[in-house]
Image: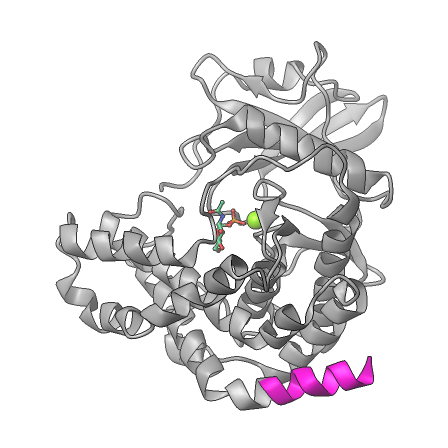
Amino acid sequence: MTPAKAPPEFNQITAAFALSGEVISVGPCGHGHINETYELVCDDGGQRRRYVLQRINHHVFKNVPALMENVQRVTQHVRAKQPRALALVPLHHGGFVKQDSAGDWWRVYDYVERAITVERVTTEAQAREAARAFGEYQALLVDLPGGRLNDTIPNFHHTRTRFETLRRAVNEDTQGRAEGVRAEIDFAYAREADTDVLLDLLARGELTERVTHNDTKINNVMLDDVTGRCAAVIDLDTVMPGLSLYDFGDMVRTAASSTTEDNPDATQMHVVLPYFRALVDGYLESAGAVLNATERAHLGFAGKLLAFETGLRFLTDHLQGDVYFRIHRPGHNLDRARTQFALVKSIEDNADAMKRIVDDVEKAV
Ligand code: GN1
Ligand code: MG
């Protein structure tokens, strides 16, 4: 995907939303790979008010009204319990999403002020707080009224499907890139058996479907810039039925790792055990009462699985010509696949130590 373009008919779009004041500036916002995100600054009678405007990627999220129904239900439910949680801004004429003449969909959130996101954890306290916050989010959604949420992306974390998609991309090799990534393909194929582990446990009833966030990377939690406590969980487009282990695993992938997924030098990537311990500690503090013994027993494996699955997705996108994740340089998705696979290897090498950490933390709770 190419970097964000200037949005068309911008004024008509912002005018449709019930904003306080006049829009005085628009700038880029965040580091997401899928949607386009802008910061809107409004002048409200001399007071500055900020909003987040997003163009929803409808090639990725094919049913935007169904997605927005989820987001609306979830934000309404969480906001009643967390005053700083994300809130949608309505349209003047009702509803929360505006379609422009090109068929693109737009929505606006209130800006979460006095809070930051980080791309990489630098203290154990940050890791613990992020995990506590995502665990709390999970626990808050246990009593979400209104029935099952829509599947905004079917089979999103179905690792077997992700694996088969990679295999198809290798066989089709539309860009002629397979030869150059033989080592990565072999790495993936050697771990095929991992793809079914959680799916088999789910089929046997040992894991339970829950309402999960499904994209718990570290930059999807906003931390108060003074206290460091969670201000808001963001990026709610994939909140839908899922496994809690997907949420925990994606935290391990992005918060118990030594470098970012974008690092072109994959040798710098490894699991950071003190951050892993902090994640287990924070997650069990808030979600511990919800989790069953099978979930607890697979916390380390979940980190490996999500790094593996995300690596499969990056490698597939590289082979297919970078059509899904936004890239900022040639080979970017390949670099990302390499960091993910380096993390998988590191988690394999540290599996015993990670198991001991989980046991230790459980004993202490
Ligand atoms: C995407 O939108 P963003 O950048 O927060 C992706 C996640 C991946 C992540 C990898 C809808 O998240 O699943 O884990 O990139 N979101 C979607 O950085 O595919
Ligand atoms: Mg995001």
Viewer-proximal residue, 210 or 256? 210
Q: Is residue 128 left or right of residue 244?
A: right
Task: Report whether residue 51 is seen.
Answer: no
Count up the numbered dots: 0
**Residue at (48%, 80%) from the top-left corner?**
347
Q: Is residue 298 left or right of residue 125?
A: left
The color scheme shown is one colour
Q: Tell me where residue 281 sits by quadrant.
A: bottom right
Q: Is residue 147 left or right of residue 197?
A: right
| Magenta stretch secondary structure, dominant | helix
Residue 109 on image: x %, y %: 70, 33
Q: Quadrant of the C terminus?
A: bottom right
Q: Tell me where residue 160 sits by quadrant.
A: bottom left
Task: Report whether residue 268 is seen.
Answer: yes
Residue 358 on image: x %, y %: 67, 82
Specify whether residue 126 is painted magenta.
Answer: no
**Residue at (52%, 37%) from the top-left corner?**
152
**Residue at (30%, 69%) from the top-left corner?**
188
**Residue at (57%, 28%) from the top-left corner?**
66
Residue 161 on image: x %, y %: 36, 53
Viewer-proximal residue, 324 or 359? 359
Residue 67 on image: x %, y %: 57, 32
Q: Tell me where residue 226 sits by quadrant.
A: bottom right
From this view, report whether residue 318 is shown above or below residue 127. above
Specify whether residue 362 is painted magenta.
Answer: yes
From this view, report whether residue 35 is shown above or below residue 263. above
Residue range (magenta): 355-365
Spot the residue most to the top: 93
Q: Quadrant of the N terminus?
A: top left
